[in-house]
Image: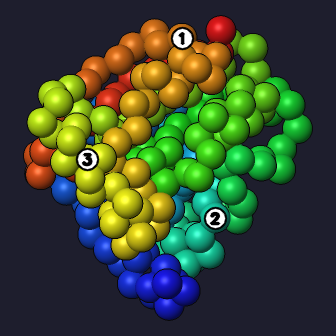
Amino acid sequence: MGLWARYVLPVLVEKACRSSAILEERQRWVPRAHGQVLELGVGSGLNLAFYDPARVEHVTGIDPSPALLARAAQRVGAVPVPVELVTCSAEKLPFPDATFDSALVTYSLCSVAEPALALAEVRRVLRPGGELIFVEHGLASDVGTQRWQHRLTPLWRRVGGGCHLDRDLPAILRAAGYRLDELKAAYAEGASWLSYTYEGIARPR
């Protein structure tokens, strides 16, 4: 899995994240980030071009994958806002308390080993009144698709870099101490077991 994670998975992740549906989601949500921004799971940097320079002072993008960050670094020069890339996990952020005005995560919490711990870290580094902007796939609304998600997740995690198909994101956010000020949940394009998407804004309670 070492060679797979280093050489193959970054290419597959970037290809999967270039769909027209995900592009529309980036255009809709990334510009809502503001101030000092933390991007969790910045990956190859596909969100970077969509930050609004009139609203954003600085973006700190974190990811545990050096291979994906190397791809992101190639995009930084064309980004309209200052960007710093940091290799670390979401469960242990190397930043002081109350550092960021907003945080963004797109299609990354599904792969975090301990999402509750990661969300606690986001709460810690957000300033009072800060917000978490999220776009994530997860547990579908209908029981039939849920059954397939539960069955496929053990195999999918092995080939998909730890990605879970069946996480109930709203429940995870609420359990981690967030209120959901905006939430949209619906199927996007693609296979039903992979395309049920949650979009919105959460704020620490």
- The answer to whether residue 135 is visible is yes
Vertical side of 93 occupied by 124: above or below: above
Mark 2 to mark 1 CA distance (whole Å): 27 Å
Location of residue 180 in the rendering, given as x and y in whole percent from the top left corner: 47, 13
Q: Is residue 201 left or right of residue 66?
A: left
Q: Is residue 25 left or right of residue 102?
A: left
Mark 2 packing: few (<14 Cα in 10 Å), some, or many (20+)? some
Residue position for label 3: 149
The reply to whether callout 1 and callout 3 are in contact (CB within 8 Å) is no
Residue position for label 1: 179
Q: Residue at x 38, y 60 (%)?
A: 154
Q: Residue at x 64, y 16 (%)?
A: 177
Name the kind of residue labelled 1 in the image. Arg
Location of residue 162 in the rendering, given as x and y in whole percent from the top left corner: 47, 61
In what quadrant of the picture does the C terminus appear?
top right
- The answer to whether residue 14 is visible is no
Mark 1 packing: few (<14 Cα in 10 Å), some, or many (20+)? some
In the rendered image, which quarter is residue 115 located in?
top right
Location of residue 149 in the rendering, given as x and y in whole percent from the top left corner: 25, 47
Front label number (3 vs 2): 3
